[in-house]
Amino acid sequence: MSVEESIARALICDTGRELLKTGLVARTWGNVSCRLDEKHFLITPSGLDYLKTTPEDIARVELGTMDWEGKRKPSSEKGVHAAAYELFPEVGFVIHTHQNCASAIGLAGFESMDITAAERDLLGGVAKAEYGLPGMKKLKNAVRAAMQTGAHTVFMVNHGVVVCGMDKKQAMERVQLLEKVCRRNLRVSTTAPKRLDEKKASALMDAVRAQIPTAELSGGDYAVMWANTKKTLYAQLDDMAQMLGSHVPCVKASPKKIVKALKARDAVFVQGLGAVVKADDPDDREALRLLTEKSALCALHTAGMGAKVKLGTVDTALMRFVYKKKYSKRKG
């Protein structure tokens, strides 16, 4: 292994941890790659926590054939990264994230987005890729078509974004700028939501945990805002479909109703409280907590835009099946 390759592998690992620290990715979501030479690139492995990823875990992929080398299978989105390196000779680093605000804008508001000419230029141009199942040829082709417009920053509908840069520094700057621009474009109230008082909320959770010990509160503002709409939240994003299924119901703040809902599903929205999630593994509970908050943000934004967005029934069921049978079992 050359010195250059060793440095690139370490740089990818460092970038994954930096993305986690800044909240631009969570758990194993997203992926990072670096061009190695004209014929090869390096990319993060599939389903491995960024905090556990070492330089030896990074896969080496051949552009022409998509053959790979390494002790771990490369990300299923390697085709999206390959498209960037094939289309843009100047691109040396690619980051794919599921960042919250950009994911929301990808669902609704892209065409009317408030973005300055300077911001668009700094992002290397922006475009939107139509939906395709994660890891499938349809998604790769959709991203390639979006990049063929010259855009280095691409919104992946119902999924996330992919950002290209000359190097890691430029790619990270673009990812962070994109989230800033998208946050400005959110159609979500900034007024603090009405909550149950702390004493009532604590007593409610104690009663729920007495029957479901692995229950945990996800009480971020967006989760509470959505819970207060009293509506079921239907999957709009791939990651929600994978981990939570087709929908998350909303119930009144009653231990009996919460427990009944959690016996059927891994999450439930509770009026005045937010979301309550359950999972045996602490990392999974944290992932569900983050996911319910993100899903609530996206649902509130699309509602504010007057847009009806919902993943297809077949796609949702397929992603849920694959996640439960394969991905969750190989989680690092």
Image (cartoon, rainbow, N blue to C red):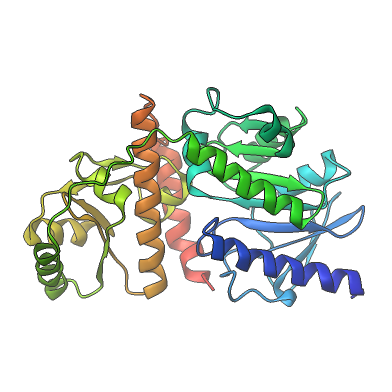
Q: Position of residue 143 (x, y in %)?
A: 67, 37
In the displayed structure, 58 sits above or below 228; it is below
Q: Looking at the image, which residue is at 65% across and 45% down?
A: 162
Name the quadrant containing residue 75: bottom right
Q: Position of residue 197 (x, y in %)?
A: 12, 59
Front residue of 296/179: it is 179
Q: Looking at the image, which residue is at 84% across and 43% down?
A: 86
Name the quadrant containing residue 200: bottom left
Q: Position of residue 20 (x, y in %)?
A: 55, 64
Q: Is residue 3 left or right of residue 231?
A: right
- Can residue 78 be seen here? no
Q: Position of residue 185 (x, y in %)?
A: 48, 33
Q: Is residue 235 left or right of residue 6?
A: left
Quadrant showing the N terminus: bottom right
Front residue of 309/270: it is 270
Q: Looking at the image, which residue is at 20% across and 60% down?
A: 262
Q: Looking at the image, which residue is at 59% across and 69% down?
A: 50
